[in-house]
Image (spheres, rainbow, N blue to C red):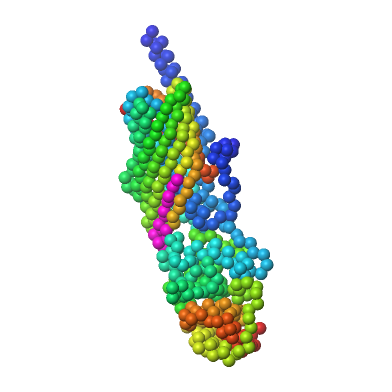
Amino acid sequence: MRWMIVGVLLSVMGLYGQTTFQEQADRLQNINAYLLDFRPSAAPDVVTKMRFEAAFDLYPQPSINSRIGSKDEPLDPPSVVPKLRGRLLLPQGWMFGGTYVPGITFEDYTADYISLELGYRVRLRGWDFGLRASYAEGDVEGPITEEGVEDQFDFSNNGFDLSVGKRFKQFKPYVFVGRNDIETELLIESDGALLRNEDDAPYAGLGLTYYHGSWQLNFEQNFTDDYLAFISVSVGYRF
Amino acid sequence: MYETKRAAWTAGVAVKTGMIVLAILTFALTGCSDADTLGDEPPREIVINGAPTWENGIGELVALKCGYCHAVPRPEVAPTNIVTDLDLNHYDTRLVDGQVIRGGDSIGRWLYDGILDQPITYYDDTSQPRQMPLDYGTPLTDAEKAMLITWSEAGAPRNDTAEITSDDLNLGADLFFRGCDGCHNLGDGLALDENTVYGPPFRRNAVSQAKIKSMWLERIEPQPLTDEQAAAIQAFILQDLLADTP
């Protein structure tokens, strides 16, 4: 049932049939880039005075079948990706946000990541509407295609989305739809092959923000095209 | 009064906590996490009806499953140590900017030698045995392998058009001893050992004019043979060297 709804939301492209290694590699690169995308992770909100919001986002990762051709890529990414996010909310409706992960090493992987967002929110008859643009880029180095090597995966994502939410006491459910453009490169160390890919995909989602004083708790379900679904959980505090 | 307020506050906290727990449970039960990487999909298959020729299916098959790497200039997706003189998006071995670039007409022997099933070497170069396609390439299906072998055994033809004929055995012999015999040794082949083969023995069905022209350009001299010259060499090989070979 979920996928039927998502299909309507995202215009399912059709069932996939036989495939090639290029399509498999492209899809893996797309999924890894979209999983690192900078999605809303909070209901659109209009504030009456300037607020700064700090949040800790957790992205549980879906299981990935990493077979390309006859070869299983030894991908063993972390089961959860954390991000620290900051947002500045202005009473005029503007919102600025970002995350930054400086070259951290986790297990055998090293990752650099930065993302920025700019949004505008407006309240109409009790409904909060948001328009948001986001940018994310980063790279991951580690044994992506083979044990013991240092492959390099680079990505950059541009996206924009529209969201709407309405507050019911301490709860604010919201939905959003958007579109994303990505560019990825995978450099395979062992043989020097370089896989470049560009892709664009619609995304959509729904979420629920719970407010408790200055604290807020957020759950969000994300769908990207018809082949990727993931959730995020956030805890935030407003100063 | 204080007790009443405290009880109300406690009840409120309990309700809120209950709602949060309910929300978490609802989300956990209905939250969707899935990534379709196409890792479960079978490889694309080229279906060939009738006798396989380059123009009837083999060209499309080889371009799809080999030509993405074996192209000139080397595509980014190809390994850096790939052979640089093989372009499987074309049938003819040809000269490009003075360099001989082998085409689909040159791979029949590789298929016959079993490169689809085991690592083999590039004749006198034993440094890099390879089985094709590589593990991460698009696999060949059993039906596609069978078609490639059938095509190889038929001399890796371009199409089903009959080749021109020649009865000029003297010209054929002259050219053969000038260019071919050094490695093919009267058609019996020449090998240092089983891994170092300078020239394999001839297979009657595989002695095509396209293969002769391809080998001449690749190994003998960078001056293409004419159709008549290739036909003469073929006639000499089939009617003289392999006259007693079924």
Where residue B228 appears, as percent x and y from the top left, is 58, 84
Count how many numbered circles sit on residues in the image.
0
- Judge left or right: residue A99 versus residue A202: left
Q: Residue at x 60, y 76 (%)?
A: B155
Give percent across and percent down for residue A104: 33, 46
Residue B222 falls within the magenta-colored stretch: no
Residue at 48% over, 78% down: B218
Q: Is residue A189 magenta?
A: yes
The furthest residue to the right:
B50
Q: Nearer the viewer, residue B143 or A121?
A: A121
Out of B50 and A147, give the one closest to the viewer.
B50
Q: Which residues are magenta?
A: A181-194
Seen in the picture, residue B142 relative to A231 is either above or below; the reply is: below
Quadrant, the N terminus of chain B: top left
Determine the image quadrant of residue A58. top left
Vertical placement of A65 versus A3: above or below? below
**Residue A42: percent from the left, percent from the top?**
42, 32
Please identify the quarter of the rendering in which residue B112 is found.
bottom right
